[in-house]
Amino acid sequence: MKMETQNLKRARRALALSVACAFLMFFSAGSAWARQQQQQQQGGAPAAAPQARATPAPTPDKEKVKEVAATAESLVTEFEVNGLKVLVKRRAGSLSVSGGLFLRGGARNVTAENAGIEALMLDAMSEGSANFPRERLRKELARMGSAISYGLSYDYSVLSFASTRANFDRSWEIFNDVVLRPQFALEDVRRVQNRLVISRRDDTDTPDSFIEVLQSRVAYAGHPYMNDPDGTEQTLSRLTVEDLRRYHTQMMQTSRLLLVLVGDLDAAKVRADIAASLGKLPRGDYRPSPLPPLAFKSATVDVTQRAIPTNYIQGVFAAPPISSEDYYAMRVASSLLQDRVMVEVRYKRNLSYAPEAFLRTQGANLGGISVSAVDANQAVSVMLFEISKMQREAAPGSDIAGVISSFLTRHYMGQETNAAQAGDLAMYELIGGGWRNSLTFLERLRAVTPKDVQRVAQKYMHNLRFVVLGDPARIDKNVFTVQLGD
């Protein structure tokens, strides 16, 4: 299944780097995942007071945690083939195999003129190759129950695949042909191009998607992320088959690539297979350009007029990336803020159905709040007050423990599939300081204290950049630009 292109771009990106958008599904940083789960659980039921949080489970023994992490690390084999870094995680007895060829760079690979070329290239590659044209490719994949897909983000992209273990060898052969010898047939490229253009054309049709577009323009002004990897209707329309072929040649250098495989695989055999296929790509000398962190000097609010019954609001602040030690405390702080704004905005005041606090997972990261409300001023005022409260007062230890316990369940549920584990390894390897950091996620999360949460709230949750879609006459900008923490 191709990566979905409806509604929220954030959900499409941060959670879509895998087969059927599964590679990073659990790592939406409490934003899109939390909102979807919340809506599914609460449905259309009337607002009710939240139930008391269950008593958190006892913290596991630290030595046991380290032992589990060490065992997990021993399952991963790391090696290079002609500059191509490879991670193979063995899951003995697993009946499926998932993997992906990750392209480093993301938004830094494209310009304002060719933005979207990587998305179009990867989508068109999965349509057919020299030895497996479109019809044959589809029949082969359907016969085996295998899949080839793609995903992209501001930091990297992926051409991914999944198969049963019994059909891995044939699926791997097809995947290699797609990577090395894409057909880029004119009719395939035009069909994919039209689909992507239409998907970008409707980004402004719904308030949920339009608010993301507006926020990107404000938050990423002057930053490499301003070049949207998804492209625009205009940039996508200008691309040609020749452009894709040139870009493919440019990108298929082993220094630009990362290969991750998860399943019941023999790493030695995989290495030999790679040496005979992807390892023959030119090495190149790619070095990623430094990614500047996001920084906002003052609070701002930009209002876009639209005749809709309610106002849509999103405010973001510069947040620590997953490579930062502060990220773990910020994960807890964001989840705690989510609980509090739900209580204060929805349950107590009935100002909005789904107020949200979120934290993204990007190399240059953002956190923030969002809400849709008729009384935007009151809703935002309440949410900012809750941020201010977190900055002034350390949260009770029981609240912090409860949040961390909820992450425990969510983490292991998110790691059930090979695709999710492959995506986790890749994300940490590419933007998280190395894949081994993925194994210490829970250990670092459990180390977060109430003082840590208060500290990161003071350090990061200020100078919010707000965008509003709705009625400018109903917006008091003084409410949105109130000064928070330092």
Image: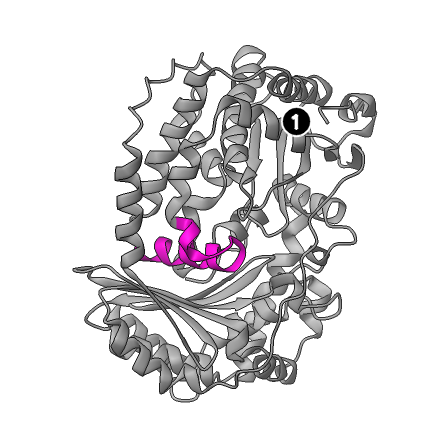
Residue sitting at 54 percent across and 55 percent down? 431
Residue most extreme to the left: 93
Q: For residue 436, say whether it is visible.
A: yes
What is the tally of numbered marks visible in this picture?
1
Residue sitting at 59 percent across and 15 percent down? 393
Disc 1 residue crowd, few under 14, some 14–19, many 20+, Cα 10 Å: some
Instruction: Give the side of residue 445 with respect to residue 234, left or right.
Output: left
Residue 68 is drawn in which quadrant? top left
The residue carrying mark 1 is 458
Q: Which residues are magenta?
A: 417-438
Residue sitting at 55 percent across and 11 percent down? 348
- Decide: is 388 above or below 297: above
- Residue 143 percent across, percent down from the top left: 25, 73
- Decide: is 113 above or below 281: above
- Residue 376 percent across, percent down from the top left: 70, 23
Residue most extreme to the front: 63
Magenta region's main secondary structure? Answer: helix
Amino acid at circle 1: Gln
- Residue 202 percent across, percent down from the top left: 64, 53
